[in-house]
């Protein structure tokens, strides 16, 4: 894979998809439909998916592309593939809470090695550069050239006073019970894949997820986390988290800054 080209193309497509999403987000009204699994989908999900899929297929015609909105057609598998969630946090989008993201990742042999996460309503853009270092870009987000970028890095955690981030729309008692095992100084909630980015940027130490997710929900932000020195493991046995699983379904997981003393699942 040409990582320079990959970084340029995925950044541009994420920004273009963000523009499309925001046009619908800022409209007076938009239709909300239910998918076969009862999860919501909007015109913004579908339009962003079409835009990103077409752009990736044109730029990387020989690479398998897996996207959330075309999940029912994904019968192929490959060691290396692109994986897309065009609008993660649809519930946040519908409630107009702003915490939704565009996510594009490239997976090599089970590991998300490059990714871009764009939160258009929040004006935050995170991605791995061509070298694999994670950065946050600020500025006007021009499509043809990157603006000011700052490398991001996970914090050095204090296990006596951890900052924990948890899901805003999918919080449950099991998650709260697990978080209670840690000594926390504060806890915050965030929507979509932004939770990973908060850990990657040193704004949180720990993000446990005890709920159903799919690989497209996590791959891009996991790449950003890894590129910032963070880790993601399975919740049950703390083993390495991998991609390209049958059906692209994830187990429960923990994303964290190395140095956090992980507690057992039970």
Image (cartoon, helix red, strand yellow):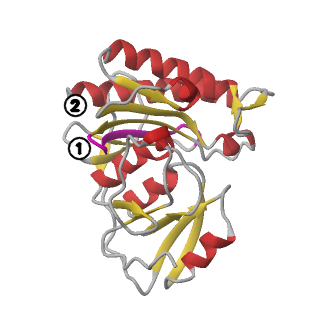
In the rendered view, tell whether residue 58 sits above or below residue 169. above
Q: In the rendering, at what x and y percent does residue 233 appear?
A: 38, 62
Q: Does the magenta portion include 183?
A: no
Q: In the rendering, at what x and y percent does residue 183 appear?
A: 49, 85
Residue at point 45% right, 68% down?
236
Residue 168 seen in the figure: yes
Q: Magenta: predominant secondary structure element?
A: strand
- Determine the secondary structure under disc 2: helix
Residue 169 or 36: which is nearer the viewer? 36
Q: Residues within 10 Å of mark 2 (few under 14, many from 20)?
A: some
Magenta segment range? Answer: 109-121
Residue at point 66% right, 57% down?
170
Residue 60 or 151: which is nearer the viewer? 60
Q: In the figure, is residue 104 to the left or right of 23?
A: left
In the rendered view, tell whether residue 73 sits above or below residue 39. above
Residue 177 or 258: which is nearer the viewer? 177
Image quadrant of residue 145?
top left
Mark 1, residue position: 132
Mark 2, residue position: 3
Residue at point 21% right, 27% down?
1
Q: In the rendering, at what x and y percent does residue 174 appear?
A: 63, 71
In the rendered view, tell whether residue 157 sits above or below residue 119. below
| Label 2 close to label 1 by CB (< 8 Å) | yes
Between the residue at mark 2 and the residue at mark 1, the CA separation in whole angstroms equals 9 Å
Pointer 2 or 1: first along the chain: 2
Image quadrant of residue 28?
top right
């Amino acid at each position: 894979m040409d990582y320079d080209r990959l970084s340029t193309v995925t950044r541009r497509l994420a920004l273009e998809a963000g523009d499309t999403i925001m046009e619908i987000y800022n409209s007076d009204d938009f239709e909300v439909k239910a998918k076969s699994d009862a999860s919501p989908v909007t015109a913004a999900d579908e339009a962003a998916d079409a835009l990103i899929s077409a752009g990736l297929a044109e730029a990387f015609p020989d690479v398998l592309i897996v996207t959330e909105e075309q999940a029912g057609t994904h019968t192929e598998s490959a060691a290396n593939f692109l994986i897309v969630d065009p609008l993660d946090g649809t519930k946040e989008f519908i409630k107009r809470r702003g915490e939704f993201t565009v996510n594009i990742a490239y997976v090599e042999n089970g590991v998300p090695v490059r990714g871009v996460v764009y939160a258009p309503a929040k004006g935050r853009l995170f991605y791995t550069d061509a070298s694999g270092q994670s950065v946050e870009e600020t500025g006007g987000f021009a499509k043809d050239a990157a603006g000011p970028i700052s490398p991001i890095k996970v914090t050095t955690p204090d296990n006596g006073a951890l900052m924990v981030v948890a899901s805003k729309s999918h919080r449950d008692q099991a998650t709260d019970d697990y978080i209670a095992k840690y000594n926390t100084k504060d806890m915050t909630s965030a929507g979509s894949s932004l939770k990973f980015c908060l850990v990657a940027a040193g704004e949180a130490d720990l993000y446990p997820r005890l709920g159903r997710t799919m690989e497209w929900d996590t791959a891009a932000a996991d790449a950003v986390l890894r590129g910032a020195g963070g880790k993601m493991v399975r919740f049950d046995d703390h083993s390495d988290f991998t991609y390209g699983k049958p059906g692209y379904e994830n187990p429960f997981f923990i994303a964290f800054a190395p140095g956090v003393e992980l507690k057992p699942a039970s």
